[in-house]
Amino acid sequence: MYDEVHRPRFHFSARQNWHNDPNGLIYHSGRWHLFFQHNPEATVWGNMTWGHAVSDDLVHWVQMEHALYPDEHGTMFSGSAVVDRFDTSGLGEDTLLAFYTAAGNHVEPPKHYTQCLAYSTDSGDTWLKFDENPIVPWIDAHNRDPKVVWHAPTRCWIMALYLADDRFCLLRSTDAKQWARIQNITLEHDSECPDFFPLLDETGIERWVFWGGSGNYLIGDFDGALFSPRSEVQICEHGTNGYAAQTWSNAPSGRRIQISWMSGGRYPEMPFNQQMSFPVELSLRGNNGIWTLCRWPVEEIESITESLDVPVSVEFDGSKPWPMPVSGDLFDIAFDISADDGCEVVLKIRGIPLTFDFERRVVNFRDSQVPMVGKGHLSVRLLIDRTSVELFLGGGQVSANFCYLPDAYVAPLVFNVRSGTAKLDRVRVERVDDIWESVR
């Protein structure tokens, strides 16, 4: 177990069987809780149950007993969790509250989809379902995926809920049990798995982000009763495999940490199926109504990396490829790249090409086009695992998640130029450790 050929080495994957959306992300008593959609019986989707893993550093994970099993209300679909510091629910001070969709055993009509509550009085080790579930009856279509957040100025709980198509809504409660619908929200070209959270912009003013399952988002203001968008819909996830991202509640030091399901990866003949992204920290860049949501790998990755000795600056042309003088298959690499106009620089990652197209100003990987940022040179960071590549451009202004399987190769990282010349500066290569060594 945890030593299979296609097992991600520093990304979370379930011990066995299928998993998808991250659920109920919460930090409490020194532990990061990661719940997730899980089929405990097979490596394909079905029988949705909340799996559970914990970490004390966002890097090393230990899978626990399952938290929520299907019941008379249905299978356990996605949701969120919070700390009830002030005992608003009457279930006890500092009780953990989990909100989830009961999917009516996945039968029609869709009104069987309802929102339910579970709670934990032992810091998330065990969970009890609320006796008076559901707490939110059916509203529309397959309404699901409740994300709940505390709004301190009005001392209210706010729930973001998916309805249908690109339609969402906000609900409000003072006790986490009785909810009233307060606003409808449209998030164009997105659906499912909403997230709703505050972030400080670069001037120190609080803004609110409304996020959808595909990584589209709005930035605006929220007063406890009305979310007022102040941006157009923007795209954060430019890859083919990032989906259903959620952020941890109650994170220390005001951090906003996010993790995604890397949807659609292939893990042939493995006892597990699917993986999560590596956790990233979110920030807002810009002001005066123009902001960008930036993602950057959490600093805790430094606890599992080792610097490798590579040239800091390299110039090359199309006369011959330049293999990086490294070995292995797990890397955290960063570099600045500049090239002639119209130049294509190809980095083969374990035999699979990632192309920097300086004529079209895009980065290509597995038939996806990721927009470049900046002019003159491009700042790049890559997290490379056995079955995934995560790309960050411009300090996280653009990001993308990809799953892949390697092709035949001699050197794991090889640069080449198809026309013109290119230069790498500020090259840094870190070898990443295997996070599963301690649990095998």
Image (tube, grey):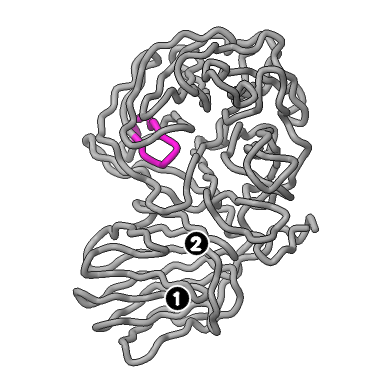
The structure residue drawn at horizontal position 44% and vertical position 43%, both measured from the top left corner, is 282
Q: Amino acid at mark 2?
A: Val
- Which of 132/336 is in front? 132
Q: Amino acid at mark 1?
A: Lys
Label disc, if present, on residue 389 of the rendered structure: 2
Counting from the top left corner in percent of width and height, residue 2 is at 74, 58
Asked which secondary structure carries label 2, the reply is: strand
Determine the secondary structure under disc 1.
strand
At which x and y percent is residue 226?
34, 16
Vertical relation: 58 (above or below) 69: below
Residue at 30% x, 37% y: name it. Answer: 203
Q: Which quadrant of the rendered structure holds the C terminus?
A: bottom right
Instruction: Answer above or below: position of 437 versus 340.
Output: above
Work out how far the residue at label 2 is from the one at label 1, CA to CA, in angstroms: 12 Å
In the image: residue 247, left or right of residue 46: left
Task: Name the residue at the bottom extreme.
Answer: 319
Q: Residue 93 at what x, y percent from top left?
A: 68, 16
Q: Nearer the viewer, residue 268 or 240?
A: 268
Q: Are marks 2 and 1 in contact (CB under 8 Å)?
A: no
Report which residue position mark 1 lands on: 348
What residue sits 69% from the left and 20% below the top?
119
* Stretch in magenta: 204-217
The quadrant in which residue 78 appears is top right
